[in-house]
Amino acid sequence: MPTSMPCPSIRIPVELLTQSSFSQFGTVIENPAHSPLPPSQRGPAPDAVSANQGSAIKLLDVTHPSNLYSLAPSKKPAKAVMNMFICSPRELRPHEPSESMPSSWGDLDFDEDDYGNNDRALLDVSILERHPFTTQTFIPMGLSATERHTQYLVIVAPTLPAAASKRHTGRPPPYPTPDVKKRTTSIKDIFARARPSPFTNEAAPPPPQYSRLHPSARPKGPGLPDLKNLRAFVASGNQAVTYGAGTWHAPMVVIGQRPIDFVVSQFANGVGMEDCQEVELMAGRNAEEGVVVMVDSDSSGKVIVKAGVGSVMAKL
Ligand SMILES: NC(=O)N[C@@H](O)C(=O)O
């Protein structure tokens, strides 16, 4: 049974999926040459080398898979797995105005559909999940960059501090934490941190345990999702996405007319609570509704970006 947490009534606009807007949650894998953003807004391009006797360009380290299962309580090792998810389009409900609190986008009145003939529908977000010890990469297949009728949304939330999570649920959050005590009290570890090092004569301080990981791939801590700062991104068919280890996210959301096939790459050790944790979102006692993503689309069915880079608001 997943943990449940009360949630506020909040409506979230859709943003464009870009590496910079998504960086705290994971990485976006795309060929920068096909980015809709001007070069000045694209962020650093991955390193590239020539490959295949000059007939290919190889982009290096386009995402950062991480396997943190050595921190899992079971200590059961994980293996790299590739699964396939065939994700059907989600049911949206018709738009109706609400008294929802403003999202983290502030006072902008996203409830007003002032953009002419757009359609607005609502997606209720009723569950979030995370994989505390692994990244998870979703690679769509057979979806073109310009597909208008079928797209996918990537919905993510930051992690609340553990203390705030305890207030929500009244019990400790369901997060398997590493046995830090054992490691920090070992004699070998104490000597390993001494400087100059008795083992290598190294004078510089040792790097913090996770400093070499991409920020999105560092363990996020045990907290529940921060629903007030939940974000919803629309991806195009030429983008794959990696959720950083422990990042709260909604199960993949396909919008449109047909299922999307995703190849999904991650680590797993087969221990249920270590591979995947879920939290059910229940509208709080005084909340009119729960967490809702507003999905606006144009007359062809293409999702319209309403917040952040490339949004209709930004163009006003
Ligand atoms: N994201 C998504 O759709 N599903 C998963 O993360 C999963 O492992 O079930």
Image (spheres, rainbow, N blue to C red):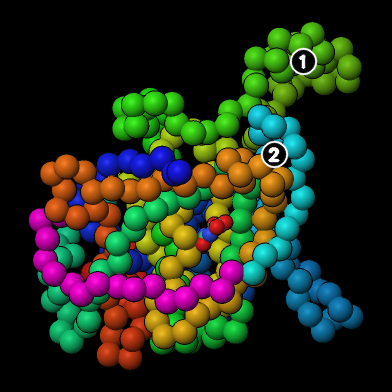
Q: In terms of depth relative to the viewer, which is nearer, 90 or 249?
A: 90
Q: Look at the picture and state if 130 lies above or below 164.
A: below
Is 127 positioned to the left or the right of 65 in the image? Answer: left
The amino acid type found where label 2 is placed reads Tyr
Residue on which the image places disc 2: 69
- Asked whether 231 falls inside the magenta stretch, the response is no
Dividing the picture into quadrants, the one containing residue 262 is bottom right
> Is most of the magenta stretch helix, strand or loop?
loop
Q: Residue at x 51, y 44 (%)?
A: 277
Mark 2 vs 1, N-terminal side: 2
Q: Look at the picture and state if 219 lies above or below 192.
A: below
- Magenta stretch? 85-103
Q: Residues within 10 Å of mark 2 (few under 14, many from 20)?
A: many
Mark linked to residue 315: none
The amino acid type found where label 1 is placed reads Asp
Q: In terms of depth relative to the viewer, which is nearer, 68 or 309?
A: 68
Cα distance, mark 2 to mark 1? 20 Å
Residue on which the image places disc 1: 189
Q: In terms of depth relative to the viewer, which is nearer, 260 or 170?
A: 170
